[in-house]
Image: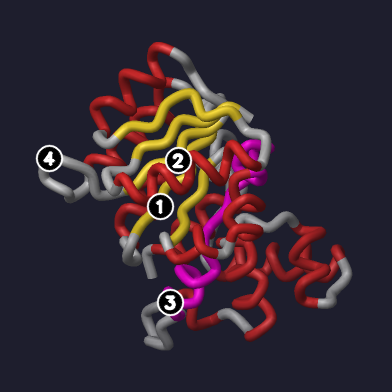
Amino acid sequence: MRVILAEDSTLLREGLVRLLAEEGHEVLAAVGTAESLLSEVAATPPDVVVTDIRMPPTHTDEGVRAAVEIRRRRPQVGVLVLSQYLERTYAAQLLADGAERVGYLLKDRVAQVEEFLEALERVHAGGAAIDPEIVRRLVVRTTRTDPLARLTPRESSVLEALAEGLTNAAIARRLHLSVSSVEKSLQSVFDKLELEQTTGYSRRVLAVLRYLES
């Protein structure tokens, strides 16, 4: 695949360039600012963008804002965002327009080369890739007012896997369930979260957003 990288750490940026080249991917550009990222994507649209969240000059949310802009302007381009820490608000912001061709990984995941490359391939193929550590940290609150507290352990496990971007078949394999059981659990999740079937909206995406915002 053709990739554009945006990472202000020269060491990590060059490491990613070498890793992707060794895997046979083409790195169209490797830049250190969000502004340069947007310029490069406009000049030569890639298959996937890999970008840090915190970029110069303020090192706050330049990277994720650029990622959201790329998803708005060029929905055919996959976006994989890297973060040093869990940024729940940014994760929800990134997924607000849907969970297709999007990923959110903690930077530690890059060291797990196979997992990083798998996430990249999943985003390239049109799916989602949410770091499992991020999902684990978003613990379901057990307050009376939280609709997530009404989920059964199985439903919570299914929703957790869904938040990672897994398909129904992949969820079934992980949890050792039948696909029909996964489908029934998801329907129950949608019902308990009061996510009605509405034209123009994906209940899968809405459920993940509800989970990320919990």
Residue at left offset 81%, top offset 68%: 172
- Residue 203 image position (x, y, % from top left): 58, 51
What label does residue 82 carry, if any? 1
Asked whether disc 1 touches disc 3, contact meaning CB atoms under 8 Å apart, the reply is no
Mark pair 4, 3: CA separation: 29 Å
Which secondary structure, mark 2?
strand
Reading the image, the residue beneath label 2 is 50
Q: Earlier in the sequence, mark 4 or mark 2?
A: 2
Mark pair 1, 2: CA separation: 7 Å
Query: Which of labels 4 and 3 is toward the front?
Result: 4
- Residue 155 image position (x, y, % from top left): 65, 76
Asked whether disc 4 touches disc 1, contact meaning CB atoms under 8 Å apart, the reply is no
Mark pair 4, 2: CA separation: 19 Å
Asked whether disc 4 touches disc 3, contact meaning CB atoms under 8 Å apart, the reply is no
Which secondary structure, mark 1?
strand
In the rendered structure, does residue 152 fall within the stretch colored magenta?
no
Reading the image, the residue beneath label 3 is 137
- Residue 129 image position (x, y, % from top left): 57, 53
Asked whether disc 1 touches disc 2, contact meaning CB atoms under 8 Å apart, the reply is yes
Query: Which of labels 3 and 2 is toward the front?
Result: 2
Q: Nearer the viewer, residue 114 or 15?
A: 15
Crowdedness near tag 3: few (<14), some (14–19) or many (≥20) residues, C-alpha within 10 Å = few
Q: Earlier in the sequence, mark 1 or mark 3?
A: 1
Residue at left offset 72%, top offset 70%: 185
Chain part drawn in magenta: 121-139
